[in-house]
Amino acid sequence: MKISIIGTGLIGGSMALKLREKGIADFIYGIDNNQQHISEALSLNIIDAGTDLEYGVKNADFIIIAVPVDAARKLLPGVLDLISDKQTVMDAGSTKAGIVNAVKDHPKRSRFVAFHPMWGTENNGPGSAVSESFTGKAGVICNKEESAADALQLAEKVAESLDMHLIYMNAEDHDIHTAYISHISHITSYALANTVLEKEREEETIFQLASSGFSSTVRLAKSHPEMWVPIFKQNKENVLDVLNEHITQLRKFKAALEKENYEYLEELISNANRIRGILR
């Protein structure tokens, strides 16, 4: 089938590579406001042709929207305006409620499947795309009952061709869960990076002394604001909720040290160690 990828960067590019490898895509159109991304995607054989939005949407069987969530929210209604009742649209956004609500009353809502591939890195652009990126990762489909049976089936086939295992939930629950297991990790990483940059002014010292633990913790701080500011904006209430809890936990560690209550400090660390039984 013909597939159009709107957004030929890390996520869209990785999807395109895998779907081509699996033989799901006979022809892949790339649609991107960044013409350098189109050129790079062509040279890397990620896409077969670059085109404009209207042509790419009208001439594809399956359309994947892989742009920042604020852009996806604005773009989706117009994409649905262009399609027939035989085409399917799927997004890849990290927040879901805002995107789902943007088209809840659209006459072609049933042709849309809300999807979140639970994978990403701090890198961006077509050059960062890797075909095996999604292997073994969770793919979340939200509000599946609002999608037509054939559209849902095709989206499931695409997700399974990415070698992902599928999870189903409603959009609101998805946004709550991702605030806790994804979005707060990025805020924490940004804050830690800013703390170190503020207090440790010698860049060479940071480079020489940074341990693997520090490097892995601040890796997410390399993630680009054009992607993450919209995510925080779209999921603001949930992110604020988890951020308040995180600040409470930090205060507990601070109080334990200030009061030299090392027994309580050990208790806090031991409680955190329970994560070992969940994440292996």
Image (cartoon, rainbow, N blue to C red):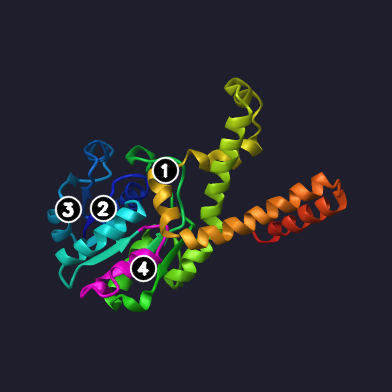
Residue closest to the eye, 18 or 195? 195
Magenta region includes residue 44: no
Q: Nearer the viewer, mark 4 or mark 1?
A: 1
Q: Secondary structure at mark 3?
A: helix
- Residue 174 screen position, x and y as percent: 47, 66
Question: Local crowd at mark 2 within 10 Å, few (<14), some, or many (≥20)?
Answer: many
Highlighted magenta segment, given as a residue range:
92-113
How far, Cα to Cα, is label 3 from label 4?
Answer: 24 Å
Residue closest to the eye, 78 or 30? 78
Tell me what residue is drawn at x 54 percent, y 48 percent.
187
**Mark closer to the chain start, 2 or 4:** 2
Q: Read off the residue under disc 1.
A: 225
Mark 3 vs 4: CB contact within 8 A: no
Mark 1 vs 3: CB contact within 8 A: no
Q: Read off the residue under disc 2.
A: 5
Question: Local crowd at mark 4 within 10 Å, few (<14), some, or many (≥20)?
Answer: some
**Mark closer to the chain start, 3 or 4:** 3
Q: Amino acid at mark 3?
A: Leu
**Mark closer to the chain start, 1 or 2:** 2
**Mark closer to the chain start, 2 or 3:** 2
**Quarter of image, res 280:** bottom right
How far, Cα to Cα, is label 4 from label 1?
Answer: 30 Å
Tell me what residue is drawn at x 29 percent, y 46 percent.
8
**Mark closer to the chain start, 1 or 3:** 3
Tell me what residue is drawn at x 70 percent, y 60 percent.
277
For residue 156, the mark is 4
How far, Cα to Cα, is label 1 from label 3?
Answer: 25 Å
Residue 24: in sight, yes or no? no
